[in-house]
Image: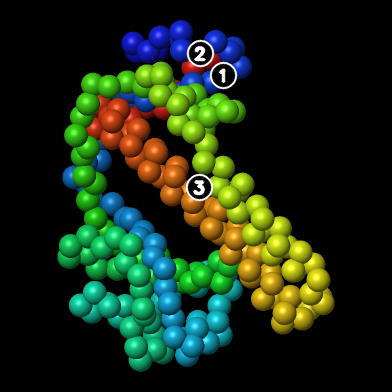
Amino acid sequence: MDGVGNDWIRSGQAAPVVIGRPVSLVDVSGAAVKRAYRHRLYPTDGQAVELSRTFGCVRLVYGFRWRDGHLTLAKMDQPLAIVWSRPLPEGAEPSTVTVSRDPAGRWHVSILVETTVERLAPTVAVVGVDAGLTSLLTLSTGEKISNPKHEHRERAVLARAQRNLARKAKDSNNRDKARTRVARVYARIADRRRDLLHKLTTRLVRENCEDGGVLFRAVA
């Protein structure tokens, strides 16, 4: 296991993963690639009506204008109010714009641009990772990453929202509103889980990246 011992795990049912030297990976550092940046979108009432008019779950926008960091869609006079969670790469020009709305009623815009891949600083560290029951992850270094149990924190709020939904008459506007409130609770849980996993995997990759790449390998 490339220097990682098996003493840290006793169960034969576990399948640890080793992050270490990449094997047969193509070095794309410095190469131009397409990357989508997804952001929250807050359309005006008029913009929401225009989007909903030809809208399913996702709408690929064929006509848009990008000027001075502002995005304006076809048939709209004002640019979209976008919350930029991260800036687009300097000098990037959008090639495709996709607008979506999730079950919680939240609007998002995905902007596809061409950018370059930055090479990570290499390290010599190697780590074994085991997904457990009492802990979210156990590392070969002895570190245990606890499970925050996001669903438990929202359990009472979710139960109240579901009871409220069950009391609403079918096919009524009030039921649609109650269904959206339930979806928002589920969305908060999913967002917190996604944020935790993104930060955790980013940390593991940056701390255990050799020659600019990563290898994930299951070990029996």
Q: Check disc 3 and report the residue beneath it.
A: 193
Residues at marks 1 and 3 touching, judged by CB atoms closer than 8 Å: no
Q: Is residue 171 left or right of residue 29?
A: right
Q: Earlier in the sequence, mark 3 or mark 2?
A: 2
Residue 45 vs 187, above or below: the answer is below
Q: Check disc 2 and report the residue beneath it.
A: 9
Distance between the alpha carbons at the discs numbered 1 and 2: 8 Å
Image-quadrant location for residue 94: bottom left
Residue 76 percent location from the top left of the image:
39, 89
- Say few, some or many: other residues with alpha carbon within 10 Å of mark 1 (under 14 / 14 to 19 / 20 or more): some
Q: Nearer the viewer, mark 1 or mark 3?
A: 3
The amino acid at mark 3 is Arg
Residues at marks 1 and 2 touching, judged by CB atoms closer than 8 Å: yes
The amino acid at mark 2 is Ile
Q: Is residue 71 left or right of residue 129?
A: left
Local secondary structure at mark 2? loop
Distance between the alpha carbons at the discs numbered 1 and 3: 23 Å
Residue 208 vs 102, above or below: the answer is above
Q: Residue at x 36, y 73 (%)?
A: 82
Q: Earlier in the sequence, mark 1 or mark 2?
A: 2
* Residue 218 visible in the shown view: no
- Say few, some or many: other residues with alpha carbon within 10 Å of mark 3 (under 14 / 14 to 19 / 20 or more): some
Residue 183 percent location from the top left of the image:
62, 64
Q: Is residue 211 left or right of residue 95?
A: left
**Residue 113, numbered label:** none
